[in-house]
């Protein structure tokens, strides 16, 4: 049962990721301090930020961020227009080209799924503990 939802849509901009972090924090603040611990809240913001960063970097430049609370979990879902699925890759420790984010998302989340969109694109939801 979903008790609270939030949604944010944006196009590529310098402040898009920061806006996603602000939206996630505002969502968590609206839940109240008793609903989620500090470490779990930090993980929600971090995973949301990483999913949005990946959507902007690899997914065509636009995204929709959805947050929902369920009994025992918080769901973060990012939709983007690119049908290409995320993939694990070895982190680049030399040239700084990334490779850390998808590993981190999967380590912090209880579950991640990649769902193809109805036309093109995809939605990447992640469930995190409360």
Image (spheres, grey):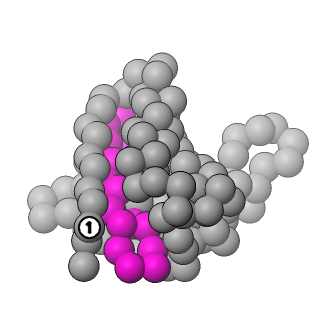
Q: Which residues are magenta?
A: 54-75
Q: Is residue 111 visible?
A: yes
Q: Is residue 114 visible?
A: no
Q: Is residue 94 magenta?
A: no
Q: Nearer the viewer, residue 34 or 17?
A: 34
Residue at 41 percent across and 22 percent down: it is 13
Q: Position of residue 72 (x, y in %)?
A: 46, 79
Residue at 54 percent across and 79 percent down: it is 110
Residue 34 vertical placement versus 26 (above, below): below
Residue 12 vertical placement versus 109 (above, below): above
Q: Position of residue 61 (x, y in %)?
A: 35, 34
Q: Is residue 28 left or right of residue 117?
A: right
Q: Is residue 128 left or right of residue 84?
A: right
Q: Is residue 4 left or right of residue 112?
A: left
Provide the secondary structure element on which disc 1 rests: loop
Q: Residues within 10 Å of mark 1 (few under 14, many from 20)?
A: few
Outermost residue on the right side: it is 94
Q: Position of residue 54 (x, y in %)?
A: 50, 47
State the quadrant of the N terminus.
bottom left
Q: Position of residue 96 (x, y in %)?
A: 77, 38
Outermost residue on the left side: it is 119
Q: Which residue is mark 1?
A: 3
Residue at 38 percent across and 48 percent down: it is 30
Q: Nearer the viewer, residue 12 or 15?
A: 15
Outermost residue on the top side: it is 14
Numbered label tally: 1
Residue at 26 percent across and 67 percent down: it is 3
């Amino acid at each position: 049962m979903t008790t609270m939802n939030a949604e944010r849509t944006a196009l590529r901009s310098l402040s898009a990721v920061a806006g996603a972090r602000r939206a996630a924090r505002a969502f968590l603040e609206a839940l109240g301090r008793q609903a989620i611990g500090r470490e779990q809240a930090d993980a929600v913001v971090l995973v949301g930020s990483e999913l949005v960063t990946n959507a902007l970097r690899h997914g065509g430049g636009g995204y929709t961020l959805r947050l929902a609370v369920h009994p025992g979990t918080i769901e973060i879902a990012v939709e983007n227009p690119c049908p290409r699925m995320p993939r694990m890759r070895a982190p680049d420790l030399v040239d700084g080209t990334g490779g850390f984010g998808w590993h981190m998302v999967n380590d912090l989340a209880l579950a991640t799924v990649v769902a193809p969109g109805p036309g093109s694109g995809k939605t990447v939801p992640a469930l995190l503990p409360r």
